[in-house]
Image (spheres, grey):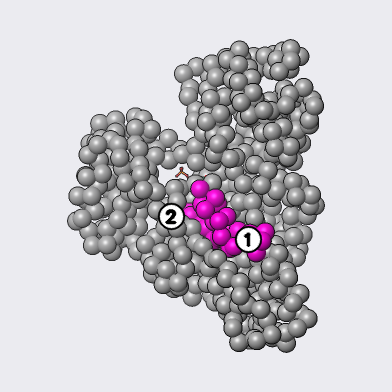
């Protein structure tokens, strides 16, 4: 690093001192905390993004968002050249950088790391970082901090993309690096065109059914609502009404949004007795999660939740059906010797009934840690990898090799086969690969795929929900003195530390038929999460409560 670069870094870093006594760590999807203490972290992540761009000679993305967290929080997610999350290899550097004690220390760490990674300084190469933010009030000033971080690396350019959903930014990063058109209008065009294509391919007998075209969407008072308003203008055959779009004074994620609906299993604000039976969906604060629900009764606020596991099951069923048609053996003229590898990825939060259902379909089901970065990585090992967390975060990945095969197959079928069904199956799979976000879980593209598949199957939301019966479950949060004291193993299903806690959980679980429970430290909130499942809702509630009491006893502030 030359003197000029060092001087620029030192000068800019002194403008962003770290707050006293704060230690932040890179969590499930980046840094997240109360917005008031984040400026220096975001500034430093700006530097990291510029270095990552220099190293990879590709566009990198930075998204200012705290997704499902309360409005006073904020955070930063980093999109790697593929559009996926930052490589896990750089996470320790992100941690070290965020916690450097002062400007001198920061520059020393950067020099060391750049040397180890062979990162060229001095404007020899250029770097480009796309910046996006959600609708949080703290977003603008944190965006400025990120911009200053990026600009303190000579040759690096920050491009402000304004207010976006997180998946839009990831999609743009991936698109730019592939040399594709990747503006916001391009995003809407690609989604609406591929949705239109899937709708045109709906079997005639299903298209003739009088299906309910209306979908009511809870926008979590976040960015998703306004973006969906844009997208819906381009859609045919689907009528979307957005509520909780944030324009009517509602608070982001407060009593609204996918996280609230999935955890509490009650109607979000602005939904109520008049909505009984309607097909409804809920997005989270940055629109990377999606769940569906319908209101059960006029007399209470209960819903039937159709969560990420059921979205996964719907997608898996459809993909499997199309693959079955495409690779059927009867057509002698067509070469069907390619065995397509289809894999499904879940986490410990997946409802046991969903895993049984998927295995019953004959699918390969794999488990990873919580966090899309882990699920995404696993899913990418397949020709088609479908991953979803129960909380509604997920997508379907198509390998480049498989998409090429599919294109060739489509052309082959068009020229030699008279089997229209096979041709349509190839076209449907290609349309899905264009519709569903290949970079990261995306509520808007996921929603369009759900709608197209429901129409294809001729299913109402009620029919979809009956695919299998969820085992009753309950999730709780426990505030503890230090959540890093919990160490887990086996895809977060076993507590290794503190000693004795897992035995206590086992003893509680054994009391309930079909009981299952685990705990893990959240990587986005300062809490321990508790999950419990059992044969009745009362049992799941009671199991979760007793496990939470043990957590509090072992790690808490001594209230029990
Ligand atoms: C993020 C991650 C998800 C994860 C969620 C909760 O979602 O992207 O993969 O499930 O956090 O993580 P934790 O339980 O560690 O707090 P989002 O939508 O908040 O960005």
Q: Position of residue 319 (x, y in %)?
A: 57, 70
Q: Is residue 68 above or below residue 454?
A: above
Q: Is residue 120 above or below residue 299?
A: above
| Category of crowding for the residue at label 2, using alpha-carbon neighbours closer than 10 angstroms: few (below 14), some (14–19), many (at least 20) | some
Near-viewer residue (296 or 557): 557
* In the displayed structure image, the side of residue 112 where residue 513 appears, left or right: left
* In the displayed structure image, the side of residue 469 where residue 95 appears, left or right: right
* Mark 2 residue CB less than 8 A from any atom of ligand 1: no
Quarter of the image with the N terminus in it? top right
Residue span colored magenta: 374-402
> Residue 116, can we see it?
yes
Near-viewer residue (388 or 199): 388
Name the residue carrying label 1.
398
Q: Position of residue 343 (x, y in %)?
A: 51, 63
Query: Secondary structure beneath disc 2?
Result: strand
Name the residue carrying label 2.
367
């Amino acid at each position: 690093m030359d003197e000029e670069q060092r001087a620029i870094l030192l000068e800019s870093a002194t403008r962003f001192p770290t707050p006293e006594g704060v230690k932040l760590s890179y969590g499930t999807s980046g840094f997240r905390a109360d917005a008031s203490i984040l400026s220096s972290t975001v500034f430093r992540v700006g530097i990291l993004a510029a270095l990552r761009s220099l190293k990879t000679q590709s566009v990198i993305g930075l998204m200012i968002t705290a997704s499902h967290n309360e409005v006073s929080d904020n955070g930063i997610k980093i999109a790697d050249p593929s559009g996926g999350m930052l490589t896990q290899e750089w996470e320790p550097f992100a941690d070290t950088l965020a916690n450097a004690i002062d400007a001198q220390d920061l520059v020393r760490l950067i020099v060391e790391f750049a040397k180890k990674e062979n990162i060229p300084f001095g404007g020899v190469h250029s770097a480009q970082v796309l910046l996006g933010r959600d609708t949080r009030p703290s977003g603008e000033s944190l965006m400025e901090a990120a911009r200053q971080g990026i600009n303190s690396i000579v040759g690096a350019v920050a491009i402000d993309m304004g207010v976006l959903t997180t998946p839009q930014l990831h999609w743009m990063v991936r698109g730019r690096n592939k040399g594709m058109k990747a503006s916001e209008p391009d995003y809407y065009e690609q989604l609406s065109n591929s949705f239109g294509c899937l709708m045109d391919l709906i079997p005639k007998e299903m298209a003739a059914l009088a299906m309910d075209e209306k979908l009511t969407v809870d926008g979590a008072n976040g960015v998703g609502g306004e973006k969906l308003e844009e997208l819906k203008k381009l859609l045919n055959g689907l009528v979307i009404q957005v509520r909780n779009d944030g324009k009517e004074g509602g608070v982001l994620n407060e009593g609204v949004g996918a996280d609230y609906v999935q955890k509490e299993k009650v109607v979000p604000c602005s939904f109520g007795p008049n909505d009984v039976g309607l097909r409804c969906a809920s997005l989270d604060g940055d629109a990377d999660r999606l769940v569906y629900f319908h209101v059960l009764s006029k007399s209470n606020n209960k819903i039937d939740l159709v969560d990420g596991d059921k979205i996964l099951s719907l997608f898996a069923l459809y993909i499997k059906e199309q693959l079955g048609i495409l690779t059927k053996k009867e057509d002698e003229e067509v070469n069907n010797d390619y065995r397509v590898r289809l894999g499904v990825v879940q986490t410990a939060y997946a409802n046991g009934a969903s895993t049984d259902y998927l295995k019953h379909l004959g699918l390969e089901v794999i488990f990873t840690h919580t966090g899309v970065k882990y699920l995404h990585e696993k899913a990418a090992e397949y020709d088609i990898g479908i991953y979803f967390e129960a909380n509604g975060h997920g997508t379907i990945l198509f390998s480049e090799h498989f998409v090429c095969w599919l294109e060739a197959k489509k052309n082959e079928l068009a020229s030699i086969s008279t089997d229209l069904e096979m041709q349509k199956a190839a076209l449907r799979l290609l349309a899905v690969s264009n519709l569903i976000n290949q970079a990261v879980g995306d509520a808007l593209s996921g929603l369009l795929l759900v709608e197209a598949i429901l129409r294809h199957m001729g299913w109402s939301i009620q029919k979809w929900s009956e695919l299998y019966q969820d085992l009753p479950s309950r999730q709780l949060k426990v505030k503890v003195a230090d959540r890093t004291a919990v160490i887990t193993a086996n895809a977060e299903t076993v507590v290794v530390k503190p000693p004795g806690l897992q035995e206590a959980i086992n003893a509680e679980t054994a009391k309930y038929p079909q009981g299952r429970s685990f705990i893990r430290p959240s990587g986005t909130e300062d809490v321990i999460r508790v999950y419990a499942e059992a044969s009745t809702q009362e049992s799941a509630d009671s199991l979760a409560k007793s496990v939470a009491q043990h957590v509090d006893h072992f790690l808490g502030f001594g209230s029990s």
